[in-house]
């Protein structure tokens, strides 16, 4: 029922509608959810673009699931998007069993959206080559571009890469989280030696180092509760 005027001790409310009052928090929640989803989607589009247009042509395996996927694509007859999806799902399953509730809906969403964007780019821009005609510039452009997407994710208290592996090492091996992240990242970077030349390996290691500096700035310089997402 709608009352034109409701009088409470010390307060008079005109055109009071209890139904509207009850629905207002729900509407705000839906609005915030849509806004957050759009922001996360935009961030993952930027990250996927950085991977597909710069990291993939460079052949460098800068610390990330996508970097590992680039190496595996030399051994597995699947596109990068499919390999990334498989790795993400496997790590999500491992993460749920080992780290529990830290892996929520946002983590699952971003982990699935990244390979979907990669698949979209593979369809629209098949067999794309280097946009800069320089392996060094490709790695540099990747770091600069992906840092934009990561900064958006970190604003939403999400951070990514091989952090599921790092958190497992932190939990079960009692290794410092920062050291675990560096170790897992360097392992991916050094895996480039399996298929590429020395120059690519060096670029992978340097790219991982400078990418780590960016992550340190956004993660460890802020006293916030952290969630994990896979990029």
Image (cartoon, rainbow, N blue to C red):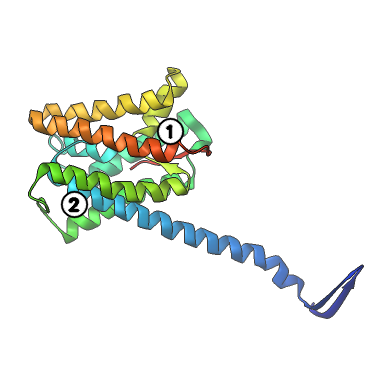
The residue at 12%/27% (across/down) is 194
Q: Nearer the viewer, residue 77 or 19?
A: 19
Figure quadrant of the C terminus: top left
Q: Nearer the viewer, residue 187 or 80?
A: 187
Q: Nearer the viewer, mark 1 or mark 2?
A: 2
Q: Earlier in the sequence, mark 1 or mark 2?
A: 2
Figure quadrant of the N terminus: bottom right
The residue at 15%/30% (across/down) is 202
Relative to 54, say whether 192 is above or below: above
Mark 2 lies on residue: 53
Quadrant of the rendered structure where residue 191 is? top left
Specify whether residue 163 is in view. yes
Mark 1 lies on residue: 95
Tag 1 and tag 2, C-beta contact below 8 Å: no
Residue 140 x/y as whole percent: 20, 44
Disc 1 secondary structure class: helix
Quadrant of the rendered structure where residue 179 is? top left
- The Cα–Cα distance between marks 1 and 2, rounded to whole angstroms, is 29 Å
Judged left or right of residue 18, residue 109 is left
For this orientation, the residue located farthest to the top is 173
Relative to 27, say whether 174 is above or below: above
Judged left or right of residue 107, residue 55 is left
Estimate how packed mark 2 is, as few (under 14), some (14 to 19) or many (20 or more) residues with alpha carbons within 10 Å: many
Residue 213 x/y as whole percent: 33, 35
Estimate how packed mark 1 is, as few (under 14), some (14 to 19) or many (20 or more) residues with alpha carbons within 10 Å: many
Disc 2 secondary structure class: helix
For this orientation, the residue located farthest to the right is 9
Q: Nearer the viewer, residue 108 or 229?
A: 229
For this orientation, the residue located farthest to the bottom is 4
């Amino acid at each position: 029922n709608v009352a034109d005027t409701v009088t409470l001790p010390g307060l008079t409310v005109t055109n009071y509608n209890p139904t509207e009052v009850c629905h207002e928090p729900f509407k705000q929640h839906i609005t915030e959810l849509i806004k957050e989803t759009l922001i996360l989607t935009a961030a993952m589009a930027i990250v996927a673009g950085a991977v597909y247009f710069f990291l993939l042509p460079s052949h460098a395996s800068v610390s990330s699931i996508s970097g590992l996927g680039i190496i595996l694509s030399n051994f597995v007859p699947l596109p990068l998007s499919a390999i990334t999806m498989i790795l993400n799902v496997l790590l999500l399953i491992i993460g749920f069993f080992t780290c529990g509730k830290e892996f929520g809906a946002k983590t699952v969403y971003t982990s699935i959206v990244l390979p979907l964007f990669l698949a979209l780019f593979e369809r629209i821009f098949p067999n794309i080559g280097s946009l800069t005609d320089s392996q060094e510039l490709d790695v540099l452009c990747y770091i600069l571009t992906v840092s934009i997407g990561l900064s958006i994710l970190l604003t939403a208290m999400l951070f990514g890469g091989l952090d599921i592996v790092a958190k497992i090492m932190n939990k079960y091996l009692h290794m410092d989280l920062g050291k675990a992240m560096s170790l897992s990242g360097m392992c991916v970077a050094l895996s480039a030696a399996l298929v590429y030349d020395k120059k690519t390996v060096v670029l992978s290691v340097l790219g991982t180092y400078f990418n780590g500096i960016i992550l340190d700035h956004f993660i460890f310089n802020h006293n916030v509760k952290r969630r994990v997402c896979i990029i």
